[in-house]
Amino acid sequence: MIDAFCHHCRVRSRIPAAFRGLPRTVVALGLVSFFTDLSSEMIYPLLPVFLVDVLGAGAIALGTIEGIAESTAALLKVASGWWTDRMRRRKPLVVGGYTLSGSMRPLIGLAGAWPVVVLLRFGDRVGKGLRTSPRDALIADVTPPHRLGAAYGLHRAMDHGGAVAGPLVAAGLLLIPAMTLRGVFLLAAVPAVLVIAVLIVGVHERARTPEATTGPLSLRLGWQAMGTPMRRLLLALVVFTLGNSTDAFLLLRLADAGFAAAWIAVLWSLHHVVKMGANLVGGHLSDRLGRRNLIVAGWMVYAAIYLGFGLTSSTGALVALFLAYGIYFGLTEPVERSWVAALAPEESRGSAFGFYHGAIGLTALPASIIFGVVYAAAGPGAAFGAGAGLALVATTLLLRVPAATPTRA
């Protein structure tokens, strides 16, 4: 299956020149992310309705489930990054993480009480924590340095493609008269099985160079190995993330402006379409224009959009801003990953991605709480304005990171 897919990807008339010749493993991992997000997004948008209407959970239960899930994933991304450097392998953790998530997620359809969903979401996020840092390190391992942006751009675009397809598949299934929410959740196992097949057949590790065969003995040594440029980049990302709350507040702003739930769902899907295209373009541009330049541009776009969300109540303007918000992701998601890969020593690449994902994941928790408190106390203008301000502060810190991409401290 993967051979046929990769052969199809080499057909010149079907794939942009910027992405021709990327390693087979990068294409396979992109396909893995597509099917994973398809499976996940068949469930996630429907989960609050299932918990409240079917299992009788309340707002506190919802917050508990998501708080435990995301904190677990963030911490394990740090540990798995260090672990993959120490064990000298990427693929076992990648396969194990995707397998665990794929087996846990559909079982939500069999849950009889919301505490069972807590356990299943915990298992799902453990799988995500195990796979993410080793997967990103594996992409860097097999990709030439001058194509890193294109590789991560393709991977993130396919990930967002799955996020577009998943809710649409779920909606189509629910049009079947006998279909229930539980049935949709159980059918999410089908793309999860395809994920494992692609991983086993299509993902291959390259031989590690002699100097990259022994990773850091501890997380502390791994942190020391990152070097000053990498630590400065992480500091800028932490400050930015403090002002980058959950996207649920953007959806809340749309709802407050009078958008019906159905239209919000449509805009959410279109938002992912923009993210998909922007990641393809942004990743490629970063290989040509430089990582720092693209991230600075992305954070400026973010600040402008947040200011707009805080200042305007026009429905047309909010739609335009929400769709333009996808451009910010294209200018940052693949670019940040390619910059981390370029800055990190090869033998500590997994640890570098662990620190990167962990810093963002753990900072996102207080960020959303702070945003929510400001939103409730002072209104959306103050909350979105604070987010824009922190983006500008983070940009000044980012300018202290060397534009070049050294491989060692």
Image (cartoon, helix red, strand yellow):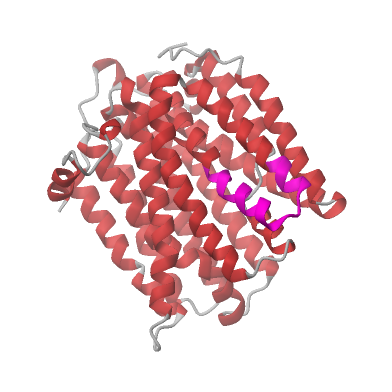
Q: Residue at x 44, y 73 (%)?
A: 171
Q: Residue at x 59, y 58 (%)?
A: 66
Residue 155: x and y, percent? 35, 41
Name of the residue lying farthest toward the right: 377
Question: Does 368 sit left or right of 215 as displayed?
Answer: right
Specify the quadrant of the image occupied by residue 386: top right
In the foreground, 264 or 132? 264
Specify the quadrant of the image occupied by residue 107: bottom left
Q: Where is 209 relative to 329, above or below? A: above
Residue 82: x and y, percent? 43, 32
Q: Residue at x 48, y 52 (%)?
A: 272
> Does residue 294 show up magenta in the picture?
no
In the foreground, 338 or 320? 320
Q: Magenta segment, principal secondary structure? A: helix
Residue 71: x and y, percent? 58, 48
Q: Where is 388 relative to 109, above or below? A: above
In the foreground, 224 or 150? 150
Q: Residue at x 38, y 23 (%)?
A: 287
Query: Does residue 220 show up?
Result: no
The range drawn in magenta is 306-326
Residue 258: x and y, percent? 71, 66
Q: Where is 154 relative to 71, above or below? A: above
Question: Does 173 sit left or right of 308 as displayed?
Answer: left
